[in-house]
Image (spheres, grey):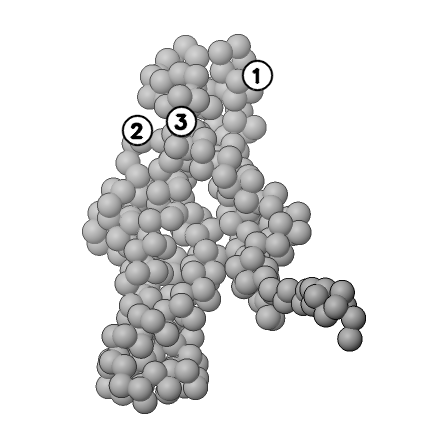
């Protein structure tokens, strides 16, 4: 055999192509969805405007002037007009977004933690614990969410803290239900049985094997409840059961401006328009996230 041929290097083997991971595929599908990306951009703009309201607001949102009340949109120094007390609407809307987002997101986060823990415990352990938790949840399901929120807020009294408590109680049942359903499905899978056969304890199985598989669906479902929570929170403030005057909040602003609808209708509908835009963007973004997470690897 020729020495040159013998000393020639062997042809390099092609490297195996690594398939993209699950979250990489989710990110790609989200970036290819223009509606979801547009909604996320709008929500990011609303959140940043609320966070930096102190820097962006052109005037003091609580400074009243009766001689400048109900100015139309486009008035000098009042780009979005003024309310029934002569306060700058742009400043009020920026600061009101802060309150509305807190009342829309915080109850869902609280309910996600409490309802998620209850649902996971009920679905994993089953038996009497499942019966006790889920039958209690069914009692809360007997009442419509709006009436339940109004009843709890009426019993506790008006105020931001009481409204958050009422909305948290309202959203615990649906999140506990979805968590229990998903956990029951995952509990019967082979990898959970293998972990149990290997001697792993219940807490280890829940932490290592169960949570990574159930948190995704629960989180996606909870993201769709944010829009509902914003609407309910605005409704409570509109009825006088949420944020108290003179705090700026979109629902409360709708209540105080309802008598000005015939004088300055465009100014009066601005808080309602922001509630609508925020809720519809939350819904569309949640739907896009749900679709992107349905990736078959």
Dot 1 or dot 2: first in sequence order is 1
Secondary structure state at the residue bearing disc 3: helix
| Residue closest to the eye, 250 or 175 | 175
Return the mark for residue 53.
Answer: 3
Looking at marks 3 and 2 on the same chain, the residue that comes earlier in the sequence is marked by 3
Query: How far, Cα to Cα, is label 3 from label 1?
Result: 20 Å
Residue ID at (43%, 29%): 94
In this rendering, would 37 be left or right of 140? right
* Horizontal side of residue 125 vs 297, given as left or right: left
Q: Which residue is mark 2?
A: 246
Mark 3 or mark 2, whichever is nearer to me: 3
Q: Position of residue 35 (x, y in %)?
A: 64, 48
Crowd band around label 3 with a 10 angstrom C-alpha radius: few (<14), some (14–19), many (20+): many
- Report the front residue among 130 and 275: 130
Q: Quadrant of residue 120?
A: bottom left
Q: Quadrant of the C terminus?
A: bottom right
């Amino acid at each position: 055999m020729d020495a040159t041929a013998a000393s020639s290097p062997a042809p390099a083997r092609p490297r195996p192509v690594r398939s993209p991971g699950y979250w990489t595929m989710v990110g790609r599908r989200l970036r290819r969805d223009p509606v979801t990306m547009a909604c996320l951009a709008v929500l990011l703009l609303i959140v940043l405007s609320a966070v930096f309201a102190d820097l962006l607001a052109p005037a003091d949102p609580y400074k009243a002037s009766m001689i400048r009340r109900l100015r139309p949109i486009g008035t000098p120094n009042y780009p979005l007009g003024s309310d029934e007390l002569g306060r700058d609407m742009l400043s009020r809307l920026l600061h009101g977004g802060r309150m509305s987002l807190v009342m829309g997101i915080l109850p869902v986060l609280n309910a996600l933690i409490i309802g998620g823990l209850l649902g996971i415990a009920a679905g994993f352990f089953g038996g009497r614990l499942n019966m006790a938790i889920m039958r209690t949840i069914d009692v809360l399901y007997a009442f419509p969410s709006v009436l339940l929120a109004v009843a709890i807020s009426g019993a506790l009294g008006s105020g931001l803290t009481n409204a958050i408590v009422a909305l948290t109680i309202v959203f615990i049942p649906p999140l506990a239900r979805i968590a229990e359903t998903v956990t029951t499905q995952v509990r019967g899978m082979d990898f959970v049985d293998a972990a149990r056969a290997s001697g792993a304890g219940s807490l280890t199985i829940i932490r290592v094997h169960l949570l990574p598989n159930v948190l995704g669906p629960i989180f996606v479902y909870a993201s769709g409840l944010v829009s509902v929570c914003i609407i309910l929170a605005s409704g409570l403030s509109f009825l006088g059961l949420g944020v108290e005057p003179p705090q700026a909040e979109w629902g409360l602003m709708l209540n105080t401006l309802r008598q000005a609808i015939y004088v300055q209708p465009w100014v009066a509908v601005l808080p309602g328009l922001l509630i609508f835009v925020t809720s519809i963007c939350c819904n569309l973004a949640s739907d896009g996230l749900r679709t992107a997470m349905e990736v078959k690897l």
